[in-house]
Image (cartoon, rainbow, N blue to C red):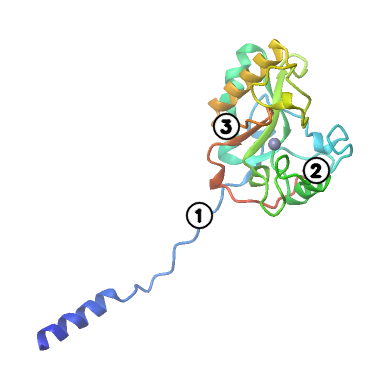
Amino acid sequence: MRHVGRCALLLLLLAAPPALAAPPALAAPPLVDVSKVVPGIRVDLRYASNRNVIGRAFYPRGARALLRRPLALRLRRAVRFLRPRGLTLLIWDAYRPPAAQRVLWNHTPNAKLVAPPWRGSIHTRGAALDLTLARISDGRPLPMPTPYDSNSARARRGARRGVSKQARSNSALLARAMRLAGFVPYRAEWWHFNARDFKRYPLAKASLSP
Ligand SMILES: [Zn+2]
């Protein structure tokens, strides 16, 4: 009996929790200005102009295209792949602040088309991009299946009806370049790409102002 009692005491002592603090949570990588990290990339944030689905600017003047640092670095691969073809990426939207997501939701309160603000968009994680291809020589965008933010059926990836062969081929080339950079093409919108590891990045609240 006495022997059992000593064993139990020893077990109790061994099971006592160590007096160590829990390790700190790993901080998410910062948002960086894509144009400063990816040489040769072009940026035209449509939500900073009136050339968008709302018809007015709701990003600040001079807004930056922000993305999580490891993802911005990966984009270099896509740009390197396109350069010998005389092409580059042209970004229309990158990180999107929560307030801007609410503006889009209020305009189109349809969860099939716009992420509801309470769920948050992958753009707000700094892990999604809306973009197209442009010529390096003069910056002109290439023909694509639809304009940006069109909710036509032609915006669906691989749509054939009413889409020229040239536009289909350009859209496929954009998807190929983005896959090289670790982004997954979104089926419903030819211009939208999510980082394949977007779940690693939490929703963020940051300023687009320079
Ligand atoms: Zn998007």
> Tag 3: residue type?
Val
* 202 over 166 or under it: above or below: below
Residue 164, how many percent across, how many down? 73, 12
**Element at label 1:** loop
Choose between 176 and 188: the one closer to the eye: 188
Choose between 153 and 140: the one closer to the eye: 153
Q: On the picture, is 36 further left or further right than 57?
A: left
Badge 3 local density, few (<14 within 10 Å), some, or many (20+)? Answer: some
**Front: mark 3 or 1:** 3
Mark 3 or mark 1: whose residue is earlier in sequence: 1
Report how far apart the C-alphas of labels 2 and 3 lie in the structure: 24 Å
Residue bearing the label numbered 2: 108
Report how far apart the C-alphas of labels 3 and 1 lie in the structure: 25 Å
Q: On the picture, is 7 further left or further right than 65?
A: left
Badge 1 local density, few (<14 within 10 Å), some, or many (20+)? Answer: few
Mark 2 or mark 1: whose residue is earlier in sequence: 1
> Tag 1: residue type?
Leu
**Element at label 3:** strand
Residue 189, how many percent across, how many down? 69, 30
Q: Residue at x 57, y 21 (%)?
A: 176
Q: Residue at x 88, y 35 (%)?
A: 50
Quadrant for ligand 1 reads: top right
Image quadrant holding the N terminus, namely: bottom left
Mark 2 or mark 3: whose residue is earlier in sequence: 2
Residue bearing the label numbered 3: 184
**Residue 169 sits in which quadrant?**
top right
Disc number for residue 26: 1
Q: Residue at x 57, y 42 (%)?
A: 198
